[in-house]
Structures are given as structure tokens and as C-alpha cells.
């Protein structure tokens, strides 16, 4: 049984974990990619700034030298001097920035070399010459060489800048692609998770929630007394165990309750038999004895009349009357001798409330059924006289399809409540012990109806 | 020797007239049976024999041909209504034989069943035996072809509450008369009981029969049967 529902739940949970987990991994990767591309962008900006700086310094060199040569005044050399001081550091910084890329490094080194050579091989000799003789320095040839050298440096710098920009664009594209992939992967992961969770939920509902609910409902019915309920054993694993256990429980409960019902029926039957026996003993034993004793007294009197004996004989006679009433209360002899019809008519004759009996059969029925019918009518008549203030009680008994149906109704005040006495409850017990049904309908002001149905089985 | 045997002996010596009613007694209780036999012997009846069950009784009746049979309704083997069944057989085989049924308790259905077999029948509670004079009087009436119905049974029928009670139209006196008639008494018998003239009783009876819409008849037995059937019928709505 282990590995039934539990294994399935574990499996589904694992799958869900993997799916959700991989979604997060994809997201992490794409975040990482974005960060790399941002870093690259910053690097590119730094390289560009540095390159432009170098370019500006080179321009300063060129313009400072030109102004000095033209004017011959030392103050115009100041930009040149500042640029010359900064350039080594600036080119070194540029080299360091592009150290990661061999091509760019080559270019940076070339720039650095060109600048150094510009200063050493051209600019400083030119300035020295200008100081000695300003006119020689202003030759066409010297100016042209300077311009050519600067253009060459600029060209290399432009290459470096272009390359760096190209690199940045490529990196941007790559990171865009990664981001797109991440979005697609996340969407797929999300959709997959939703589908999986949905499937998981449906499976849980089908395999666990619904069978448990059905079983709970059946348990309610069982608790309400319907011992015939069974749940379909269609579940998996532990659920099927639960269903099977429930059914086993219901079956044994049914068997136990059948046992109890049978034993109740036996108790009622044996109590009835005892009462019948007592009635016989009273009638055929004690009554006979009393009658013959009285006869003896009368016989003695016939020989020798005595007033005292008269009293004894009269006392015996009234004792006999009492005895007869007691015997009838214990068990109505007419029930065993004549059956339901005569017995119910006897009850009706003796009822304090007018009662009308209709019995649709003359056949004899099993003794417990006859007794139950008798006691129901007897109690109903007593109740009608005691509580109902009724003008009539109608008693109907008939047999349909092996079922004895008895209806006793009065036109009294109604409102009978079995819970407040012992009579009606006892009747219900007696009828149910025989597998029958006993219903009391007693709306206030609309009379009381007792309906009894008893299966006629032997 | 038990005292009752002595008394029976004395009775037999005293009464030796040939017109004594010949009786058979059936009861499963031997003491009661013998007590009854002795009472009857003492009181001018000739006891032909006693029986302990229905079969013995039928033998006795077929052999001796008694004029009157006194039979307990409940006897072995079934301890149910064997006496009533035996009475049926006797009345069929010997319609002239009078039958008095004794019962431990009153039962209308049984009484009516017996009454339906014709005249010369009686139905009494067993304890009535102890009211000796009344009992002997009943025996004589039955033996003469009259009918006897136990007063307790009549009371049960007359006193029963009815939704639309036709007896409500009767006066108190008429009710008394009706009860005595139902017990099987003749007009003269009723008159004796009530200390009135027979003509007065006749007047009451005619008034009762008219009020209850019952046919008049000179036959006492038919009158009893009609009244009992009527009372039983209105009881449970059969009319
Ligand atoms: N026919 C009826 N009409 C109106 N009320 C009734 C009727 N029958 C019963 N009741 C009410 O229902 C209650 C329960 O009746 P039940 O017969 O169980 O007990 P009881 O008659 O009071 O006592 P007992 O145990 O002696 O029968 C009564 O107390 C009475 O109030
Ligand atoms: Mg009650």
C-alpha cells in the first residue's frame, strides 16, 4: 500500500519542484547576462572617454606647438606642456583599460608609441628649433609632417573607438538575446507549472478529496441508521484501504444490529410467552381452585347454614372477579384463542372513548405480530382516553403483500410526544424488534395517528 | 370420606324421583368437576358421568345421551376452545341436548358462536358456579330450552361507548330490561327480577324493539340472539 497515493503525491511534487526550480535557474542566468552586458557598457564608456581624452591632449599638443611657433611667445606653449605632462599617464590608462582585448591593446600601444615618437622625434626638436630660429620652424615641410603625424594618431584612435563601439553593440545584442530566451523560458516554465499544479489539484481531488467526501457522506448515513450503505471500492492505495475498511465496518455493524434485533425479538417473544403462561396459571390453576373451594364452602353450608361461611363464599366470589381482571391485564386470552379481530373488538368494547374497529382479515398471524397489534391498539385507546379528549378512535387493520398495516387515529387534541412517556416508546421498541415500522403523527389540534407496518414472517 | 361425597350420597337418597335432569360434566380440573357433580346431585340433577377432555365428553354424550351438558371451554390438549368445538359437535349430533359453556373469561365471539347453534344453550363465567341458586336456575332454564348469557358479557355489550349510540334513546328502565332480555330471560323472568308486572315488561320490550328497529318475536332464544347480534354489530360499526 505504501507507494500508492503517497508515491504519486511525492512524484508530482518532485516534478513541480524541478519545473519551478529550472524556471528560476533560467531567470538567474539571464540576470547574470544582463549584469555582464551592463559591465561591458560601462567599460566601453570608460574606454571611449579615455580615448577621447588622449585625442584632446594630442590636439592640445598640436595647437600649442603651432601657436608657439607662430607667435614665439612662451605662454602659448602652456597647453602643449600640460598635454605632454598628462599624456604618458593617459595612454597608460587607455592601455590598461583595453588590456583584455589583444587587438585593442595593440592599437593602444601603437597610439602610445606614436605619441611618444611625435613628442620625441618631431615636436620637441621643432620647438627647440623655433626657440633658436623661429623662421625655420615655420617651414611648409615641418608643418605638414606635424599634421600627418597627428592624423595618423587620430586614425588609430578612431579605429580603437570604432572597435570598442562595435564590441559594445555585439555584447548588447547578445544580452538582448539572452533576455529574450529568459522570457520565453520563464513563460514556458510558468505555463508548465500552472498546468502541472492544475493537473495535480485535479488528481488530488479525484484520488483523495472526492473518495474521502463520498466516504464521509456514507458515514453520515451509517450514523443515521442506514446500515445498508456501502462505498464503491474504486480508490487507489490508502484510499481503497479506507473504503474497504468502511465497508467492512458497515457490514459488521449490520450483522451486529441484526443480532441485536433478533435478540430483542426473542426477549419480546419470551416475555409474551411468560405472560401467556401466567394468565393460564391464573385461570386454570388458581381460579379453578378458588371456584372449587367456594363450592366446598357452599356444600358445607347446604348441610349446616352459617352466616360466617356466607361471608367467606362472597369474599371468594369477589376475589374471583379481581383475579379475572388481573389475568386479562397480564395477557388477553382472547388474543391466543381468537386472534386479532376478536381481541381488538374486545378492546374497543371496553374503551372509554368510542372506538370503531375494521379488521380486513380473519386469518391467524404469528403470535408476536398479534401481540404487537394488540398492545398498540390497547395503548392508543388508553392514551386517547387519558390525553386526547377525543370523540372517536378509528382502528384499521389489514394485510397487504405480507405486511400487516395497522392505523389507529383519534380526533383529539394531538401533540403526542413519545419522549415524554413510556407507552409510545415501548410500542416503537416492540414493533421495531419485529422488523416493523412505527410512526406517530400528532399535529397539535388535528388528532393523533399511529401507523404500524409489520412484516408477516414466521 | 370427603364431605362432598357424603353430601352427594345423602342427596341421592333424598331425591329419588325419576324426572331428574340427566347431566354430563366436562372439566379438566378434577376437583372442580367433582365439586360440580356433587352440587348437581345434591340439587336434583342426575350426573351421568364426568369427562376430563373433549374426546371423553363426546364418548360420554354418545353413550349416555344426557339432556344437559356442562362443559369448560378451555380443556386439554390445546387449552384453547376445545369445549366450544365439542359443543358444536354435540349440537350437531344431538340438537336436543342442552349445552352450558363455562369460561374463565367472557368472550362475545364465543358466546355468539354458541348461541348460533340454536336454543337450549348457555354461556357463563366459571365463577358463577359459586352463586349456587342463580347457577341452578340457569341450568334449569337451559335444560328447558331457554338461553342464558352471562351478565358480565351483557354488561360489556350494553355499556360499550358508541359514537352514535342507539341505546341513548332508551330510558334507564329500558336499559335494565334490555340487559335482562339479553341475559336470556323471558318476560316473566324479567318481571320477577324487577318486581313489576309482566305486562309492564311486555310494554318496555315492545318500546325497546321499536327504538332499536328490531323485529318482534315470541321465540325467547331468537330474541336473545337478535339483541346480542345487534349490540355486537353496532359496537364496531358493522351496521
Ligand atoms: N392520543 C393522544 N392525544 C394527545 N396527546 C397524546 C396522545 N397520546 C399521547 N399523548 C401525549 O404524549 C405523551 C406520551 O405518551 P405515552 O403514551 O408515551 O406516555 P403516557 O401515556 O404519558 O404514559 P404511559 O407510560 O403510561 O403510557 C403523553 O404524556 C401525552 O401528553
Ligand atoms: Mg400512554
Image (spheres, coloured by chain):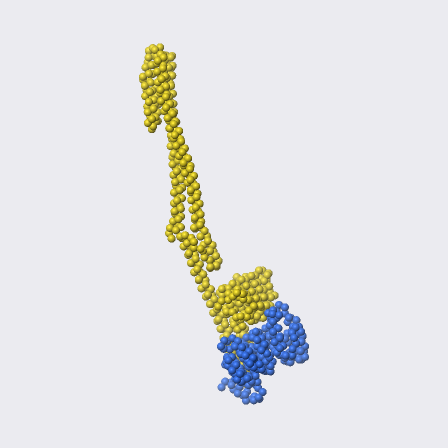
Chain colours: A yellow, B blue
Q: Position of residue B15 (x, y in %)?
A: 56, 88
At a point 32% along the width and 25% down the height, the residue shown is A106
Q: Position of residue A423 (x, y in %)?
A: 53, 65
Q: Is residue B15 visible?
A: yes
Give the mark count: 0
At a point 40% along the width and 50% down the height, the residue shown is A5
Asked if B30 appears above or below A368 in the picture, the reply is below
Q: Is residue A53 left or right of residue B168?
A: left
Splitting the image into 4 quarters, where does residue A120 fall?
top left
Q: Is residue A316 visible?
A: no
At a point 37% along the width and 21% down the height, the residue shown is A154
Asked if A382 appears above or below A155 in the picture, the reply is below
Q: Position of residue B71 (x, y in %)?
A: 54, 79
Q: Nearer the viewer, residue A120 or B118?
A: B118
Q: Nearer the viewer, residue B9 or A110?
A: A110
Q: Position of residue B226 (x, y in %)?
A: 62, 75
Asked if A159 appears above or below A227 in the picture, the reply is above
Splitting the image into 4 quarters, where does residue B107 fall?
bottom right
Amino acid at each position: 500500500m505504501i507507494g500508492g497515493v503517497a508515491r504519486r503525491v511525492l512524484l508530482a511534487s518532485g516534478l513541480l519542484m524541478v519545473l519551478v526550480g529550472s524556471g528560476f535557474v533560467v531567470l538567474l542566468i539571464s540576470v547574470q547576462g544582463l549584469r555582464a552586458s551592463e559591465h561591458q557598457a560601462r567599460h566601453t564608456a570608460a574606454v571611449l572617454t579615455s580615448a577621447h581624452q588622449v585625442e584632446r591632449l594630442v590636439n592640445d599638443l598640436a595647437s600649442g606647438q603651432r601657436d608657439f611657433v607662430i607667435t614665439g611667445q612662451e605662454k602659448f606653449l602652456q597647453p602643449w606642456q600640460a598635454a605632454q605632462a598628462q599624456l604618458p599617464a593617459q595612454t597608460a590608462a587607455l592601455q590598461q583599460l583595453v588590456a583584455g582585448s589583444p587587438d585593442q591593446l595593440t592599437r593602444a600601444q601603437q597610439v602610445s608609441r606614436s605619441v611618444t615618437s611625435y613628442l620625441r622625434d618631431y615636436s620637441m626638436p621643432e620647438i627647440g628649433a623655433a626657440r633658436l630660429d623661429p623662421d625655420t620652424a615655420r617651414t611648409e615641410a615641418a608643418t605638414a609632417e606635424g599634421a600627418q603625424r597627428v592624423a595618423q594618431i587620430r586614425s588609430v584612435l578612431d579605429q580603437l573607438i570604432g572597435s570598442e563601439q562595435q564590441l559594445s553593440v555585439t555584447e548588447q545584442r547578445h544580452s538582448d538575446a539572452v533576455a529574450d530566451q529568459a522570457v520565453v523560458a520563464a513563460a514556458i516554465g510558468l505555463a508548465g507549472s500552472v498546468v502541472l499544479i492544475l493537473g495535480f489539484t485535479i488528481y488530488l481531488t479525484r484520488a483523495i478529496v472526492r473518495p474521502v467526501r463520498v466516504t464521509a457522506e456514507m458515514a453520515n448515513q451509517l450514523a443515521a441508521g442506514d446500515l445498508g450503505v456501502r462505498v464503491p471500492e474504486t480508490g487507489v492505495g490508502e484510499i481503497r484501504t479506507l473504503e474497504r475498511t468502511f465497508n467492512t465496518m458497515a457490514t459488521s455493524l449490520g450483522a451486529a444490529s441484526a443480532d441485536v434485533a433478533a435478540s430483542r425479538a426473542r426477549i419480546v417473544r419470551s416475555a409474551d410467552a411468560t405472560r401467556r403462561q401466567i394468565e393460564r396459571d391464573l385461570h386454570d390453576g388458581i381460579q379453578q381452585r378458588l371456584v372449587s373451594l367456594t363450592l366446598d364452602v357452599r356444600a358445607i353450608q347446604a348441610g349446616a347454614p352459617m352466616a360466617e361461611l356466607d361471608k367467606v363464599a362472597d369474599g371468594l366470589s369477589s376475589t374471583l372477579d379481581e383475579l379475572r381482571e388481573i389475568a386479562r391485564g397480564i395477557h388477553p386470552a382472547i388474543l391466543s384463542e381468537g386472534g386479532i379481530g376478536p381481541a381488538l373488538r374486545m378492546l374497543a368494547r371496553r374503551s372509554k372513548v368510542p372506538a370503531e374497529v375494521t379488521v380486513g382479515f380473519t386469518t391467524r398471524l404469528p403470535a408476536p405480530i398479534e401481540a404487537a397489534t394488540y398492545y398498540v391498539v390497547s395503548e392508543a385507546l388508553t392514551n386517547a382516553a387519558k390525553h386526547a379528549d377525543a370523540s372517536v378512535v378509528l382502528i384499521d387493520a389489514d394485510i397487504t403483500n405480507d405486511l400487516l398495516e395497522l392505523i389507529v387515529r383519534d380526533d383529539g387534541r394531538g401533540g403526542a410526544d413519545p419522549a415524554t412517556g413510556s407507552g409510545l416508546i415501548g410500542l416503537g421498541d416492540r414493533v421495531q424488534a419485529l422488523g416493523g415500522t412505527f410512526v406517530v403523527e400528532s399535529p397539535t389540534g388535528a388528532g393523533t395517528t399511529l401507523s404500524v407496518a409489520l412484516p408477516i414472517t414466521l | 370420606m370427603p364431605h362432598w361425597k357424603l353430601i352427594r350420597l345423602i342427596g341421592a337418597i333424598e331425591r329419588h324421583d325419576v324426572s331428574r335432569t340427566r347431566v354430563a360434566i366436562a372439566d379438566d380440573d378434577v376437583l372442580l368437576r367433582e365439586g360440580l357433580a356433587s352440587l348437581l346431585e345434591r340439587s336434583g340433577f342426575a350426573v351421568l358421568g364426568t369427562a376430563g377432555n373433549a374426546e371423553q365428553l363426546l364418548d360420554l354424550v354418545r353413550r349416555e345421551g344426557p339432556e344437559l351438558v356442562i362443559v369448560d371451554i378451555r380443556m386439554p390438549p390445546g387449552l384453547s376452545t376445545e369445549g366450544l368445538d365439542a359443543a358444536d359437535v354435540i349440537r350437531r349430533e344431538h340438537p336436543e341436548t342442552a349445552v352450558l359453556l363455562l369460561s374463565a373469561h367472557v368472550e362475545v365471539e364465543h358466546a355468539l358462536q354458541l348461541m348460533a347453534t340454536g336454543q337450549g344453550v348457555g354461556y357463563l363465567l366459571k365463577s358463577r358456579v359459586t352463586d349456587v341458586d342463580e347457577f341452578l336456575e340457569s341450568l334449569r332454564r337451559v335444560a328447558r330450552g331457554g338461553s342464558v348469557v352471562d351478565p358480565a358479557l351483557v354488561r360489556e355489550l350494553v355499556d360499550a361507548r358508541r359514537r352514535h349510540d342507539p341505546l341513548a334513546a332508551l330510558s334507564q328502565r329500558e336499559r335494565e330490561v334490555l340487559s335482562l332480555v339479553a341475559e336470556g330471560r323471558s318476560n316473566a323472568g324479567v318481571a320477577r327480577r324487577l318486581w313489576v308486572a309482566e305486562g309492564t315488561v311486555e310494554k318496555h320490550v315492545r318500546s325497546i324493539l321499536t327504538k332499536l328497529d328490531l323485529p318482534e318475536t315470541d321465540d325467547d332464544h331468537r330474541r336473545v340472539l337478535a339483541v346480542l347480534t345487534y349490540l355486537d354489530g353496532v359496537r364496531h360499526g358493522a351496521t
